[in-house]
Amino acid sequence: MNLELTIKQSEIADKLLKELILKNRLEKDSVASFFKNADEAYYACHIIQKTGLINLVAPTESAPFILLTANDGIESFLENGGFTKIATQRENETDKENERRLKQDEILDLELKLKRFESKVGTKLLIGGAIITFLSFLITVLTLKYWGTFNEQSSQKPKIEKLDIQETHSIPRDSLN
């Protein structure tokens, strides 16, 4: 309803409506005195007319209106905050939306940094894991080889060479014989 009026224009429109309540009608020149120029006055009056609060009397191509007249509901509209409240709420919503967008952008940036960090750490962990696996395999192989050599040495019984000793079994001889 009030998407086209700024806060300042909304404040002026509310003042215009208050004046219109007091006088019940305003001429083109008195309406223009509220705004910076006639174009802004015509623009604001056209927006206010869309709400159904005022009537533009005798609009033509050269003059958008000659006279403003009031409709019912202006007082209750102003009591509820008028155009100023609507414009302020709209601006607050816009600010909140901008803040949400900024926070979402920050979150996305942080998530991107986290993904990059995870990628770098993941790569380092993968390389570290491969190195540890290789070293573990190497230690296992060397241990088996060492223990294998040690076991072979310890399981071998010392070789005792049998000396061929020729035993001569001598039968004792009698000296008498």
Image (cartoon, rainbow, N blue to C red):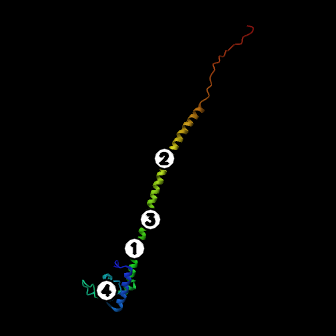
Query: What residue is disc 3 on?
Result: 106
Q: Helix or strand or loop: what does disc 1 sit on?
A: helix
Query: What residue is disc 2 on?
Result: 130
Q: Crowding at label 4, few (<14), some or many (≥20) Cα neighbours within 10 Å? A: many
Residue 153 in sight: yes
Q: Are marks 1 and 3 in contact (CB under 8 Å)?
A: no
Is the C terminus in the top left, top right, bottom left or bottom right quadrant?
top right
Q: CA distance from mark 2 to mark 1?
A: 53 Å
Q: Crowding at label 2, few (<14), some or many (≥20) Cα neighbours within 10 Å? A: few
Q: Residue at x 42, y 68 (%)?
A: 102
**Residue 55, located in which quarter of the rendered image?**
bottom left
Q: Amino acid at mark 3?
A: Glu
Q: Residue at x 50, y 46 (%)?
A: 131
Q: Are marks 2 and 3 in contact (CB under 8 Å)?
A: no
Residue 18 point in image, percent of width and height: 37, 88
Q: CA distance from mark 1 to mark 3?
A: 18 Å
Question: Residue furthest toward the top?
Answer: 177
Position of 137 with respect to 174 (left or right) is left
Q: Earlier in the sequence, mark 2 or mark 1?
A: 1
Q: CA distance from mark 3 to mark 4?
A: 46 Å
Residue 54 disc label: 4
Q: Nearer the viewer, mark 2 or mark 1?
A: 1
Q: Helix or strand or loop: what does disc 4 sit on?
A: strand
Residue 70 point in image, percent of width and height: 32, 88
Q: Residue at x 45, y 57 (%)?
A: 116
Position of 33 with respect to 158 (left or right) is left
Query: What residue is disc 1 on?
Result: 94
Residue 69 in sight: no
Position of 86 with respect to 63 (left or right) is right
Residue 118 point in image, percent of width and height: 46, 56
Q: Earlier in the sequence, mark 1 or mark 4?
A: 4
Q: Amino acid at mark 1?
A: Thr
